[in-house]
């Protein structure tokens, strides 16, 4: 099954009419993944014995029988979950993440787990113990990261929708690089129970799909309160599909100067064209400033690494995962298991975070970073007092080549310049395809105030209907 021209609605119709059985759909999906993944390497685990849930009711749930890809840092009962790390190479979870339970209740089928940067640390999916994922638009380019496997699986037509996670841009940057839609909901909109923790004050599970409405369908299912996660809001979840098909007349759209100045040439033109389309349709465009943008990269890398250094303490070679052989004593077990089990980037973050939290550095680094985070939040609050959404580029450039940035961490970190702020402020943000630059997709980022995913969907759907990017086929998948 190739999903390039399918939507959840089109599949639901076929399943409901009996033209297609859920069993056949699951089998065809796996067969296509096996074939196309020789090019993409978008998957870490594919379930050869895949079975859709029983007693599906296609009239009650749109997701009944629909295969959804799951990023490999979201735990799945009885299906190996590695976070793309050697240290979890054999980790078989004994329960489901809340998002998985919710999708199961809705009748979704799980065909496997997608590739990613180890523990979600990276922007290219090259930091995976299981090898790099390739971009379906050009196999020599990265798919972005860390949810690069989920993005490539959707863009390459292997699935109609996928779950990703976003700590500093991990859904939106790969969505932009692969010409698909991806949304990081408000912090607290979706339960993190069962998401392998990286930066707990920033991590959020979200959705990626070719079409905007399909992400709204999936978010409808996974959003909402959860007794297992006290950071999830219990407020009512609106039906996000009702924001599809609306017009943007009177919508107040802020365009940050700093974001537009970060892009140039053809890329800037493509982004500006989307803003002009909004204006022509009656949106009110306001130029604004996010003055702390220059501090977001160092700010994020101090906060995220500090939280990571604490979260990753649990991988000790004893409780689960990889354990080094030929060890002399307990300390040796810890040191060798962690040294051999973690990849370079993860070790770098643990060291950076441990340093920022250490007694002599805490005030200078972590506390300072926390204060700067508040200033960044204030910048957004000011803008949202007078605007409904903020739009601008998702990334500063289209996808770069495999191997081009992987040995230069600073270059890699700078990829996140335009996506990080939304995580620091906890606001919803998405990337919707804007067009092509040198044959590679670029994304328009849309942000809104906390719990206002509705305006994000509304704006993204309008852009999708205007530029019809979904009619384009990824060039790397042609034989
Ligand atoms: N996890 C993310 O959102 C990706 C980000 N580039 C990071 O390496 O931290």
Image (cartoon, rainbow, N blue to C red):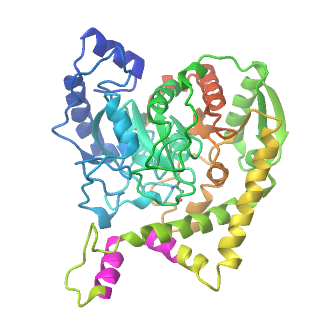
Q: Is residue 261 above or below residue 317?
A: above
Is residue 349 magenta-colored? yes
- Predominant secondary structure, magenta span: helix
Outermost residue, top side? 17
Q: Nearer the viewer, residue 366 or 417?
A: 366
Q: Position of residue 347 (x, y in %)?
A: 44, 73
Q: Position of residue 186 (x, y in %)?
A: 59, 42
Q: Residue at x 54, y 50 (%)?
A: 231
Q: Nearer the viewer, residue 251 or 410?
A: 251
Quarter holding residue 63: top left
Q: Position of residue 96 (x, y in %)?
A: 32, 46
Q: How many marks?
A: 0
Quarter in which the N terminus is drawn: top left
Quarter in which the C terminus is drawn: top left
Q: Is residue 378 above or below residue 454?
A: below
**Can residue 38 be spotted in the picture?**
yes
Q: Nearer the viewer, residue 71 or 417?
A: 71
Is residue 233 magenta-colored? no
Q: Nearer the viewer, residue 92 or 175?
A: 92
Is 257 situated left or right of 229 in this image? right
Q: Position of residue 223 (x, y in %)?
A: 49, 36
Q: Residue at x 55, y 30 (%)?
A: 237
Q: Residue at x 24, y 16 (%)?
A: 20
Outermost residue, left side? 49
Is 116 situated left or right of 130 in this image? right
Q: Is residue 111 above or below residue 412?
A: above
Quarter holding residue 11: top left
Outermost residue, front side? 227
Quarter holding residue 252: top right
Q: Is residue 194 above or below residue 316?
A: above
Q: Which residues are magenta?
A: 331-351
**Can residue 141 be spotted in the picture?**
no
């Amino acid at each position: 099954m190739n999903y390039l021209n399918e939507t959840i609605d089109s599949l639901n119709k076929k399943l409901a009419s009996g033209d297609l059985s859920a069993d056949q759909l699951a089998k065809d999906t796996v067969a296509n993944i096996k074939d196309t993944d020789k090019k993409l390497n978008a998957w870490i685990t594919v379930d050869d014995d895949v079975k859709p849930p029983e007693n599906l009711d296609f009239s009650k749930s749109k997701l009944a029988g629909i295969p959804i890809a799951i990023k490999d840092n979201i735990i799945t009962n009885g299906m190996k979950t590695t976070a793309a790390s050697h240290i979890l190479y054999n980790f078989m979870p004994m329960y489901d993440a809340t998002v998985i339970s919710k999708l199961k209740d809705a009748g979704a089928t799980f065909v496997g787990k997608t590739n990613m940067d180890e523990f979600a640390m990276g922007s290219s999916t090259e930091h995976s113990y299981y090898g790099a994922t390739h971009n379906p638009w050009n196999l020599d380019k990265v798919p972005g990261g860390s949810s690069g496997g989920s993005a490539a699986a959707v863009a390459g037509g292997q699935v109609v929708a996928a779950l990703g996670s976003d700590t500093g841009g991990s859904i939106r940057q790969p969505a932009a690089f692969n010409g698909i839609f991806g949304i990081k909901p408000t912090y607290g909109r979706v339960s993190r129970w069962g998401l392998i923790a990286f930066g707990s004050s920033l991590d959020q599970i979200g959705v990626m799909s070719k079409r905007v409405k399909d992400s709204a369908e999936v978010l409808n299912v996974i959003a909402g309160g959860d007794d297992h996660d006290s950071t999830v809001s219990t407020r009512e979840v609106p039906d996000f599909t009702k924001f599809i098909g609306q017009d943007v007349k009177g919508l107040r759209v802020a365009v940050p100067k700093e974001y537009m100045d970060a892009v140039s040439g053809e890329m800037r033109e493509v982004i500006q064209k989307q803003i002009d389309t909004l204006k022509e349709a009656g949106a009110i465009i306001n130029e604004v400033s996010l003055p702390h943008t220059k501090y977001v990269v160092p700010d994020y890398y101090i906060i995220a690494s500090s939280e990571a250094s604490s979260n990753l303490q649990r991988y000790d070679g004893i409780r689960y995962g990889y354990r080094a052989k030929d060890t002399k004593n307990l300390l040796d077990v810890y040191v060798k298991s962690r040294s051999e089990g973690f990849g370079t980037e993860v070790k770098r973050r643990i060291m950076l975070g441990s340093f920022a939290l250490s007694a002599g550095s805490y005030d200078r680094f972590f506390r300072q970073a926390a204060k700067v985070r508040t200033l960044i939040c204030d910048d957004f609050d000011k803008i949202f007092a007078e605007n409904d959404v903020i739009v601008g580029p998702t990334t500063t450039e289209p996808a770069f080549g495999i191997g081009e940035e992987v040995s230069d961490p600073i270059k890699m970190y700078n990829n996140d310049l335009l996506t990080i702020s939304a995580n620091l402020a906890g606001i919803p943000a998405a990337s919707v395809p804007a067009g092509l630059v040198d044959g590679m997709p670029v994304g328009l980022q849309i942000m809104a105030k906390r719990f206002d995913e509705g305006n994000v969907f509304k704006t993204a759907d309008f852009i999708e209907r205007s530029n019809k990017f979904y009619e384009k086929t990824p060039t790397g998948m042609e034989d």
